Amino acid sequence: MASNDFPILRWGIVGTGVISSWFVTDLSLDRPDRKANHIIQAIGSSSIEKGTTFMDNNIGKNLKRPTVYGSYQELFADTNVDIVYIGTPHAFHNQNCLDAIRAGKHVLCEKPFAINARETKEVFEEAKQKGVFIMEAMWTRFFPLVQKLRELIHSEKAIGDVQRVFCDFSMPMGIASLPASSRLKNPALGAGSLLDIGIYSLTWVLLALEGEFSHDTPDVTANQRLEDGVDMATSALLLYEDGRQGIATCSTLSKTPSTFCRIEGSKVSSKWMELRPRHPLLLQSK
């Protein structure tokens, strides 16, 4: 199919931090399996200077130069923008999403989607009312490795029925030494291990325990280690009605070992899969 036969998506980038730079770089890659032609139409930042620097550093010289705005509201008002990527700190996701939706934009919002369930519900209800698409940008779900893993687990039943999944994502962050204004230390900015890295542990657990169109709702029991109102470590136990269990943990005080996830199945008592972050193409089955 010729490139001009694909639909065109004109993106507005909200936030000019490092995670937005990764997104723009990947979106601009020439992919043989692409399903659309993506254009970086506009960049919204807290200042024209920051937005221009972001454009110069991340938009290839051979690509169309996007419009740079010194505010997010100006980007939302741009009628040439079809869809917005929100890469701001997660404490601002709720308002950024609502503003974009009310301007009639589709939205891809960086993880974690919101600070709490109330904010999430508010955003989804607004999107439904306005008839726009909205999704959390959890790229892990789209990795070829993850798609193959889910095929092995849920379609091919390589280890039988999944019974239990363990996953940990921990990394020392030295939060005690950070200034009070840091997003990792300030509760008002959504500080803590759960929202910053625990979402990955939960995602892996859910990917392994639930099929593509699962509507299961597990009972969740969780505990946290708090210091000055910020969770340094979180442990969550997910219990499903049929007996499946998920154990998701995260910590800002220690480092995850090489095997970060284990998936246990029913074929034999010692059957499981190990996932190792340093070898993303390696699935070990024991």
Image (cartoon, rainbow, N blue to C red):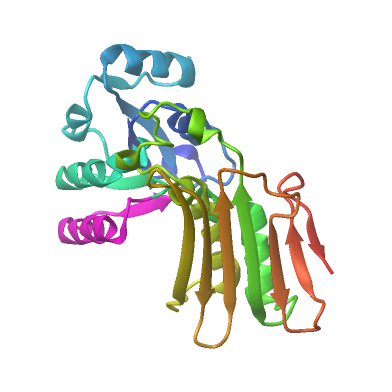
In the image, is 206 to the left or to the right of 41? right
The image shows residue 256 at horizontal and vertical percentages of: 68, 48
Q: Is any atom of residue 28 visible in this view?
A: no
Image quadrant holding the C terminus, namely bottom right
Relative vertical location of residue 72 with respect to residue 102 in this rendering, above or below: above
Residue situated in front as seen by the camera: 75 or 200: 200
In the image, is 250 to the left or to the right of 78? right
Residue interval drawn in magenta? 113-137
Residue that protrudes farthest toward the front in the picture: 228
Residue situated in front as seen by the camera: 237 or 132: 237
The image shows residue 4 at horizontal and vertical percentages of: 43, 38
Q: In the picture, residue 161 is in which quadrant?
A: bottom right
The image shows residue 192 at horizontal and vertical percentages of: 44, 45
Magenta highlight on residue 108: no
Q: Residue at x 40, y 18 (%)?
A: 55
Relative vertical location of residue 263 with respect to residue 4 in this rendering, above or below: below
In the image, is 22 to the left or to the right of 91? right
Q: Is any atom of residue 16 visible in this view?
A: yes
